[in-house]
């Protein structure tokens, strides 16, 4: 996923990766193309990248896609970049270039929150509203394609649902990758990410220097509504 502001240029990196990090024995070619653009939102591109025999694993080539500024207010637009690979396995997913939503009232930080919310809701479909009210377990969305497909509003790491390795850096990388998926939706609403860490449960593999939740509920008293009946 490659978000870019209208008028900017997206840079897509194509990296050669081999088993055991050995150089490739045979040449690898990657033909690429974007769809034609009748709406004139970007400059269509096509061409071929070549990784000759002997190219080291980790070598990267770039593809640049220039977007055009038309001053019109628009929701986000996704541009697929089709890749046809010869001599190696193609990526599991088609790279997507996303022209950010721009010029719409809900994006204007100078407007009152109430006005921004009203504008956003007026633009959303029923399916998008339902998606925003849905919280999925992160293990159910795989690499995150369902986030954009269903315009999901929230993900949850349930008890034991952790990245590998279970480190702060891996958590940040995982959640950032999910947030990037949300950028491919029409209105690019950020995800709310939840972690099941109550009732003395935590998903950290070892103690950290910062405190973690041990129990989010206050103790029951005879006068509290949560006290058991006697």
Image: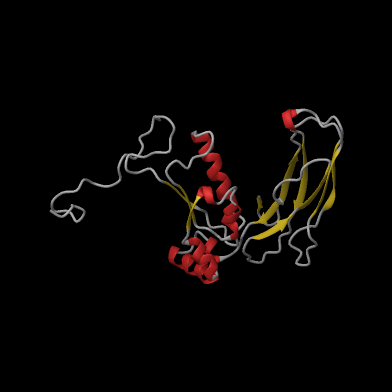
Q: How many marks?
A: 0
Residue 39 is situated, as x and y percent measured from the top left of the image, at 75, 67
Tell me which corner region of the image, top left, top right, bottom left or bottom right, holds residue 100: bottom right
Q: Quick one: 191 or 67, which is closer to the camera?
A: 191
Q: Quick one: 88 or 68, which is closer to the camera?
A: 88
Is residue 148 depicted above or below 73 in this figure?
A: above
| 105 to the left or right of 73 | left
Residue found at x 44% / y 63% = 113
| 218 to the left or right of 126 | left
Q: Quick one: 125 or 149, which is closer to the camera?
A: 149
| 132 to the left or right of 103 | left
Residue found at x 60% / y 62% = 186
Tell me which corner region of the image, top left, top right, bottom left or bottom right, holds residue 41: bottom right
Is residue 134 depicted above or below 127 in this figure?
A: above
Residue found at x 49% / y 61% = 132
| 172 to the left or right of 60 | left
Q: Residue furthest front?
A: 230
Model colouring: secondary structure
Is residue 27 depicted above or below 178 in this figure?
A: above
Residue 129 is situated, as x and y percent measured from the top left of the image, at 50, 66
Residue 8 is situated, as x and y percent measured from the top left of the image, at 70, 52
Q: Quick one: 77 or 30, which is closer to the camera?
A: 30
Tell me which corner region of the image, top left, top right, bottom left or bottom right, holds residue 71: bottom right
Residue 101 is situated, as x and y percent measured from the top left of the image, at 61, 60
């Amino acid at each position: 996923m490659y978000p870019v502001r209208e008028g900017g240029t997206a840079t897509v990196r194509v990296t050669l990766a081999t088993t055991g990090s050995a150089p490739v024995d045979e040449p690898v070619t990657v033909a690429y193309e974007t769809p034609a653009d009748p709406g004139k939102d970007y400059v269509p591109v096509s061409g071929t990248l070549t990784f000759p025999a002997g190219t080291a694993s980790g070598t990267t080539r770039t593809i640049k896609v220039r977007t055009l500024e038309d001053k019109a207010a628009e929701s986000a637009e996704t541009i697929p970049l089709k890749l046809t690979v010869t001599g190696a396995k193609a990526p599991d997913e088609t790279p997507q270039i996303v022209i950010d939503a721009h010029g719409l009232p809900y994006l204007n930080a100078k407007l009152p929150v109430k006005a921004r919310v009203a504008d956003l809701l007026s633009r959303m479909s029923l399916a998008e509203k339902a998606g925003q009210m849905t919280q999925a377990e992160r293990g159910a969305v795989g690499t995150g394609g369902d986030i954009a497909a269903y315009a999901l509003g929230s993900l949850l790491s349930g008890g034991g649902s952790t990245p590998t390795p279970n480190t702060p850096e891996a958590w940040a990388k995982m959640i950032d990758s999910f947030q990037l998926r949300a950028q491919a939706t029409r209105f690019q609403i950020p995800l709310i990410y939840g972690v099941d860490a109550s009732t003395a449960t935590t998903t950290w593999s070892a103690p950290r220097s910062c405190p973690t939740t041990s129990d989010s509920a206050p103790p029951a008293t005879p006068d509290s509504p949560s006290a058991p009946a006697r």
